[in-house]
Each structure stands twice: as structure tokens, then as C-alpha cells.
């Protein structure tokens, strides 16, 4: 949403959050903390002799789903990231956010954590190992444990696989999204399919290897629970498919039967627009409220148009289309107000130059708004060269181009905007 500060001629984009995902991530993080806080006092732990059955039940409950669920959540945002960044930058960013913490864990944190255990089982006088000796022995001879951070390398490997799939067969992830989107109105079918995938991915591996088996190549700290290799991979790619279909309109849509769409405009904003009607005169005084209302209307119309055609729509698509709509409507509105055959040439600079993004945006939100702004600015600059800066109005041709752009779907729309 565009807003103009008091004295600076800049636009600010405010964040748009999905509260359900924030709560889900918070809940799963709390479960992870709880799990590792009590596992030492259970049958499954190998530390304290004090035990309590309640902690065993907590660990059993968590172990039944929470790691697979975290891989599922991670997959939800992969497709949008690949669309925005491309596979190379996507992998670079994931290596920084996952690979670096993993290296810190296995090279620094785990040796520090395991050194007291080493001293506990090696009484004074039985060894001359100081910490540096222990650290070097861990890396060269072993064992070299990865500790609780093992999932980071698994997630990074899955990200690399999906980036390779995106690079070799770009339409495969879109097809996976269409598959999940096709069952959004059939919850029973979706549940049965998900159950079949879960059982097929886990049960045979569990019967063959059991839950105690961990696959660890050589002596390197790259472990994964053998019986759950296919389970984690299946849940991750299921998340990729659900995310590719759109988080607000796909399988995880917040309404059960179809989608509920509503447009809310602040009554105070409507009163200000009524007092300074932009249809009569669009000025700096009413530009902020005009852009706010126009963006809301754009989101509403585009969402209903796509949903009516049984087609998913992404947040990046909504933001890009809204930026284009603001430019086009403003050009037509000012042309009508100013009269004459020429289009106003100052609109692009006013809407797209000197943009400031809200510092409260999370990294993935910032990337989405920045990408939408870049796509729309590039496309509208082409519109300006072809239709606005021609000396005479070319209304019919510009409307035809805008209609064609409006009908394009996610990937095609972004490619066309950046062409």
C-alpha cells in the first residue's frame, strides 16, 4: 500500500501479513523448544535418570509430526522466492541463511557442547586432551556430531533440488501447484491423497530401517533419519506445490468453500476523498488517499476476476497489477482533467521514483514489494514510451495493451513486465 510521508516526496509500502502462518510458525518453534527441553528426562533421552511419563508423551506427540510439518512450511514459500530471484540468487540466499548457521553449529557449537561430556567419561590423568586437541580429534577422527542443527543441511539440499527442477523443467512446479489447487474445494479428497503420500513415504522405510537408524555418509556431520528421508522430501515438495497454487486462494485458503473476498476502506479516508474529490482535481493533497483507495479496489477486482476463472493468484501478482493500475488510471484521469490530445508525462516519475519501503517489512515481504515495484516501473516506462510520450493520445492502443497484460498469469505477467 502506497503512502506519502508528511514532508518527503516518497512512497512507503506497508506490510501485508498472513496471521495464520505467523501463528503456525510460532507454535512449531515453541514445540521445538519444549521438545528439546524435556527429551533428556524421557525414555528416549540418554542423560538424566529422572523420568516423567508426561514428558514421554510430549516427545512422542512432537516426534509424530513436527519435523515433517516444518519441512512442509519451508516449502510453501519456495516458488515465490524462485520467481523473484531466480535459482542462482535463491540458492545463494539460502546458503547464507541455512549453510552458514549449520557450519557455525558443527564447527563451533557442537564441539563446545560435547567437550564436557568427553571430560566426564575421561577422568583426570587418563588423557591429556585440552579443548583444541578434542576439537581437532572431532574433525579428523570423530565422532563428529551435528546436533540439533542437522535439519539445516537437509533443507538446504532440498532447496538445491527444487532449484535444479526449476532450472531444468520450469513448468514442473507450476504443474504441481495446479494439482494441489484442483483439490482445494474437495477437502476429503485432499486429505486422503495427503494420507496416502504420507503412508507410502514413511511406512516402507520404517519397516525396513526402523526409527533408530541414521544415515551419515562417512564421518561427516550430515545425518538424516533413514526411515524419514522420503517423508521429509514428500512433505517439502507438497509445501512447494501448495505454495505454488497461492497461499490465499489455494488449498490453504482461509475459507472452506471457495474464497471470501471483501474490500474495506477507512471511513475517514472516504470522507477526505469526498471533501477533495480526485475525479474533479487530482493534486498532491489528495494523492495519498487516492492511491490507497485505488490499490484496494485493484486488489479486490483482480482477486475476484481470477477466482471467478478458477485460477490462483499470488501476492506478487496482486502488487504488480495494482502498481500498473495506479499508473494507468492516473494517466487517464489527468488526461481527462487537463484536456487536449496529449497524455500527462509526469505520472511515471511521481509514482515510481524515490520509493522508500517500510523498515518493518520482513525480508521476504521486502523482496515481494521491491520486485512488484520494479516490474511495474519497467512495464509502465514502456507504456509511457509507446503511448504517453507520442504527442497525441493513443487511448485505444493503450487500453488493448493493458487488457492483454491484465489477462496474463503469474510467470507470463512478470516476464512481460520485465521484457
Image (tube, rainbow, N blue to C red):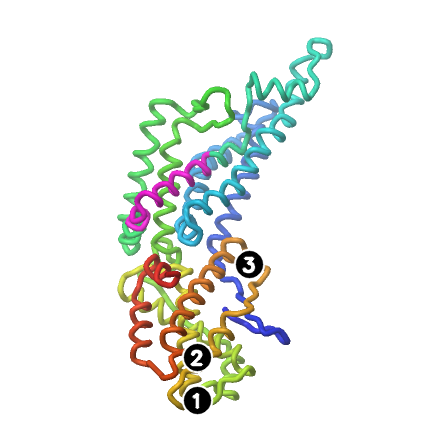
Which numbered disc flags the more N-terminal residue, 2 or 3?
2
Instruction: Tell me where residue 200 sits by quadrant.
Output: top left
Element under label 1? Answer: helix
- Label 3: few (<14), some (14–19) or many (≥20) C-alpha neighbours in 10 Å: some
Q: CA distance from mark 1 to mark 3?
A: 36 Å
SS at circle 2 = helix
Query: Compared to 315, does 212 lie above or below?
Result: above
Would you say residue 279 sits in the magenta stretch?
Answer: no
Q: Is mark 2 in CB contact (under 8 Å) with mark 3?
A: no
Tell me the quarter of the picture where residue 201 sits.
Answer: top left
Q: Which mark is residue 337?
A: 1
Q: Taking the image as drawn, is residue 310 in sight?
A: yes
Instruction: Report the span colored magenta.
Output: 154-175
Q: Earlier in the sequence, mark 1 or mark 3?
A: 1
Reading the image, the residue beneath label 3 is: 361
Near-viewer residue (275 or 282): 282
State the predominant SS element of the stretch in magenta. helix
Amino acid at each position: 500500500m502506497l503512502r506519502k510521508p508528511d514532508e518527503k516526496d516518497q512512497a512507503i509500502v506497508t506490510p501485508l501479513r498472513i496471521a495464520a502462518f505467523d501463528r503456525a510458525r510460532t507454535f512449531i518453534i515453541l514445540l521445538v523448544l519444549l521438545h528439546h527441553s524435556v527429551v533428556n528426562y524421557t525414555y528416549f533421552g540418554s542423560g538424566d535418570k529422572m523420568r516423567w511419563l508426561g514428558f514421554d508423551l510430549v516427545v512422542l506427540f512432537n516426534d509424530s509430526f513436527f519435523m515433517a510439518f516444518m519441512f512442509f512450511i519451508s516449502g510453501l514459500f519456495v516458488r515465490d522466492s524462485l520467481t523473484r530471484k531466480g535459482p542462482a540468487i535463491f540458492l545463494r540466499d539460502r546458503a547464507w541463511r541455512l549453510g552458514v548457521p549449520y557450519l557455525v553449529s558443527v564447527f563451533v557449537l557442537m564441539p563446545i557442547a560435547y567437550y564436557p561430556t568427553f571430560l566426564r567419561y575421561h577422568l583426570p590423568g587418563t588423557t591429556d586432551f585440552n579443548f583444541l586437541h578434542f576439537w581437532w580429534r572431532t574433525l579428523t577422527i570423530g565422532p563428529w556430531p551435528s546436533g540439533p542443527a542437522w535439519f539445516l543441511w537437509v533443507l538446504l539440499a532440498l532447496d538445491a533440488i527444487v532449484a535444479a527442477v526449476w532450472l531444468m523443467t520450469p513448468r514442473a512446479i507450476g504443474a504441481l501447484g495446479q494439482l494441489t489447487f484442483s483439490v482445494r474445494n474437495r477437502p476429503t479428497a485432499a486429505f486422503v491423497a495427503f494420507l496416502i503420500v504420507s503412508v507410502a513415504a514413511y511406512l516402507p522405510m520404517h519397516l525396513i530401517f526402523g526409527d533408530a537408524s541414521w544415515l551419515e555418509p562417512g564421518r561427516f556431520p550430515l545425518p538424516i533419519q533413514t526411515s524419514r528421508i522420503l517423508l521429509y522430501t514428500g512433505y517439502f515438495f507438497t509445501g512447494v506445490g501448495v505454495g505454488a497454487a497461492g497461499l490465499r486462494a489455494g488449498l490453504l485458503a482461509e475459507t472452506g468453500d471457495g474464497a471470501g473476498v471483501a474490500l474495506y476502506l477507512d471511513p475517514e479516508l472516504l470522507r477526505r476523498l469526498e471533501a477533495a474529490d480526485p475525479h474533479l482535481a487530482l493534486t498532491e493533497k489528495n494523492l495519498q488517499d487516492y492511491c490507497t483507495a485505488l490499490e484496494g479496489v485493484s486488489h479486490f477486482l483482480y482477486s475476484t476476476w481470477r477466482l471467478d476463472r478458477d485460477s490462483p493468484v499470488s501476492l506478487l501478482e496482486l502488487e504488480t497489477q495494482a502498481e500498473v493500475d495506479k499508473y494507468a488510471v492516473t494517466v487517464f484521469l489527468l488526461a481527462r482533467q487537463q484536456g487536449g490530445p496529449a497524455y500527462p508525462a509526469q505520472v511515471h516519475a511521481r509514482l515510481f521514483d524515490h520509493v522508500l519501503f517500510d523498515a518493518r517489512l520482513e525480508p521476504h515481504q521486502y523482496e515481494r514489494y521491491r520486485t512488484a515495484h520494479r516490474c511495474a516501473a519497467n512495464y509502465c516506462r514502456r507504456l509511457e514510451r509507446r503511448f504517453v510520450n507520442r504527442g497525441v493520445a493513443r487511448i485505444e492502443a493503450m487500453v488493448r495493451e493493458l487488457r492483454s497484460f491484465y489477462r496474463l498469469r503469474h510467470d507470463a505477467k512478470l516476464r512481460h513486465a520485465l521484457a
